[in-house]
Each structure stands twice: as C-alpha cells, then as structure tokens.
Image: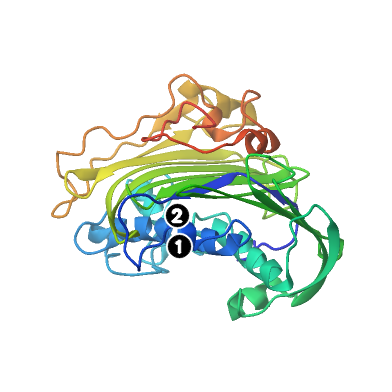
Amino acid sequence: MKKLILVGGVMSVVGFVLSSCGTTTASSSTASSYSAEKPSAIIKTVGTAVSKTGAGISVGATSIVTHRQLANQTLTSANCDTHGDPKVNGASISQSNVQYPGILTYCKMTVNDGSPDTVQGAFETPRGIACAIEKAGITFDGVARSTNVTLDTDCFTQAQLTDMGVSTFTATVTGTTPASFNSYYDKGVRIQAPSISIDYTLGTKITGNKIEFASMEAETNRTGAFAGSFDTSTGELRYEGRMERIDCSTSGSCGWNRHIRIYADLAMSNGSPTSLESVSFAYSNVQAPPGQTGYGGVVVSASGNPTTGIKARAWQATNGASATPTATSQYNTIGNWSEVTNTYCYTSSSETATTCGTGLPLFTTDPSFVLTNTSHKTTEAFGAAYAGATYTTVDLNSDTQN
C-alpha cells in the first residue's frame, strides 16, 4: 500500500466535529476562524488534536511506552512500522506479545503514514485534495464544472507527490449547499476524475461554535468511513475509522477489515490542546483469503490516564478450539476471542502499577465491531446516517457509536 492513497474509490462523507465555546483569546481557534467552504483548514485542526493525543501517550515520563524506550520521539520508526504496527528493537512483534496492545495504541495515533491505516494518516488524503480543489476554486451551486487541478507542495509534501505519481489532472467538481450526499452537512464537494480513478466527496458543517468535517471512500469491496469530533472548550476528542476490504481479492491491499474508535480528553489553553488527560481506545483487525494468505484477527483496547495508569488489553481470534480461524464467520462468535493477558499498567513512574483497573472489556453482546457479521452497518449506511457523536467512553458492543 502506498503511503498516500489517491486513487481508487468514491470518497463521501462521515463527520469530523470541532466545537469551540467559552472564553478565548486572539490566538484561539474559534468557529469564526473557519469556513464550511474551506474544508482543508478544518481537517488540519482536527488532525492536530489527534496528534496531540498520540503525543500525550508518549511524552515525558507519563508514557505507555516510556519503558519500551519510546519516550520523547515524534515518529518512532524503530518501534512502529510504516503503517503504525508495533516493533521492538527494529523487529515486528506478534499479536500474542504482551507488549503488543500498549505499543499499538501509541503507534496508531502517533505514526502518520498518509493512509487510513493510522489515525493521522486518514486525514492526509482528504486534507490534501481539499486544499488543491480550494486553490482551483469551488462554487457551491450544484453545477458540475470541469476544473484543472494541480497537486503541489502547497498542499502535499514532496514525498507524497512522488508517491502519488501525478501532478495535474482534470476533474469534474460539484459544490452543493447543503451537501447532496447528506443534508446534515452545510457544504459538500464531489471531485470526479475518471482518468485517475477518483470519485471523491467531502462535507463540512458549522453551527454556532461547532465545526464538522466528514470523509468516506467506497469502491467495490473496498470501502472506508472516518468520523471524529473535537471540542476546544472541553478538550473532548472523538474519532472513528472503519475500513472494509475483506472481500476484495487484490493481494497486499485487500483481504482485511479494520476498525478504530477513540475518545480522549485533552487539557486546553487558548483554544488549543496542550496535553492528554485521559484516553479510551479500541482497534480491530481481521483478515481472510483471497486478499490474504490465511485467517487471523486481533482486538485491542486501552483506557485510563497518565496519573492512575493506562491499561491496554488484547484478544486474538480462534476457531473456538484455541486454534487459528478457518472461516470469516468464526470472527462473529464472541467465545472465539481469547485474551492475551498482561500485567502492564502504565503510569508516570511504573509499568506495573496496580491503579489502572481492568480497562475496556471485549464485546459481550454484539461482535459487529469487527465488521464481519450481517448486522453491522455498511459503509454507505454509516455515512448516510452519521450526524455527530456524543459518547464519553468507547464501547465495543456496537459497530457504530453515537
């Protein structure tokens, strides 16, 4: 998978939310600082909050990975691979390794690989394309217009441009008010460029002190939806990323479903996040042929705060008899998930503190978080129904949490 996924799929809306209230100063980022017609600035701001959450897990002594020698590193290439999966001493570690859940939590929020494999990476393509389309010009009147789009270092890094392998293209750009794909959003933009297989849609909404952004990709057997929220008064951050490719047969980039959900509380100063106060995190990754060579799956959760401790947990999928799964349907049986127990509790002074509590449990009533059973919402249904989120702790007992 390339670092920046530009081609392939229909991108439409799911919802990032940034709200601002209370007293602010001239340096604060308030709703009036943004425009629903300029989605790239909104995406960038929410991405900054995600970055601060990841940094809060690793900075200084209050680190889930301090005792893995990861503290005070921005991009820990020695301990996270390019897609945000854990490594120790330069080598990948297995899902059964007791260090796996803690380091994965850190890596998924800290590494930015330019693709939806990581939380920050999920922001890269929509931000960059939005920036390029804004430069080319958007009219929000529902009329489709042929537009020459230039991809340059104003919107992308040079490495991203090289990775994409394209610098200009002609697109049909349609701006709508409200967004045609979901009237919840004030503004929508659809970018269609058949020559490079792009059909991409963005949406934004500003209501009072609340700013929202949404993005989704949809292609045959390759879909993904991304949603989140950030309140610059309370410091509450919410994020959800869901990717469904388990029925896609393309080797390497298919044959898996992944799901990430985050709630974090950040300390704030002048409308900007400064440090992590608490986090609640869940992640699932399951795979199957023909896109992958075999079956396997893991669910990870982490929760807590730097003072009393962050507890990370992991469960591996089995066939019901402590062996590797042999069918996708086996992911849908709750009893087939077996915990890999660990005693780690990460505080500012210890990795074996006793004040963490039990952490977030696995699903107990509904396994649709792993996105393989028939009851989970399709990507299209999730995007069409999404209208913001208010949860204050992550719950794995549902594929959708509002």
The residue identified by callout 2 is: 108
Q: Is residue 98 above or below residue 319?
A: below
Q: Is residue 384 above or below residue 119?
A: above
Asked whether residue 86 is in view, the answer is no
Q: CB of mark 1 within 8 Å of CB of mark 2?
A: yes
Q: Is label 2 in a helix, a strand or a loop?
A: helix
Q: Is residue 216 above or below residue 166?
A: above
Disc 1 and disc 2: Cα gap in Å?
Answer: 6 Å
Furthest-top residue in this view: 365
Estimate how packed mark 1 is, as few (under 14), some (14 to 19) or many (20 or more) residues with alpha carbons within 10 Å.
many
Asked whether residue 195 is in view, the answer is yes
Colour scheme of the rendered structure: rainbow
Question: Is 256 on the left or on the right of 389, as rendered?
Answer: right
Q: Nearer the viewer, residue 399 or 47?
A: 47
**Residue 322: % across, % down:** 46, 28
Task: Name the residue type under label 2.
Answer: Lys
Question: Is 294 on the left or on the right of 365, as rendered?
Answer: right
**Residue 232: % across, % down:** 37, 53
Q: Nearer the viewer, residue 390 or 117?
A: 390
Question: Is 227 on the left or on the right of 186, as rendered?
Answer: left
The quarter of the picture where residue 172 lies is bottom right
Give the position of the N terminus as an image quadrant.
bottom right
Task: Name the residue type under label 1.
Answer: Val
The residue identified by callout 1 is: 111
Q: Is label 1 in a helix, a strand or a loop?
A: loop
Q: Is residue 170 above or below residue 269?
A: below
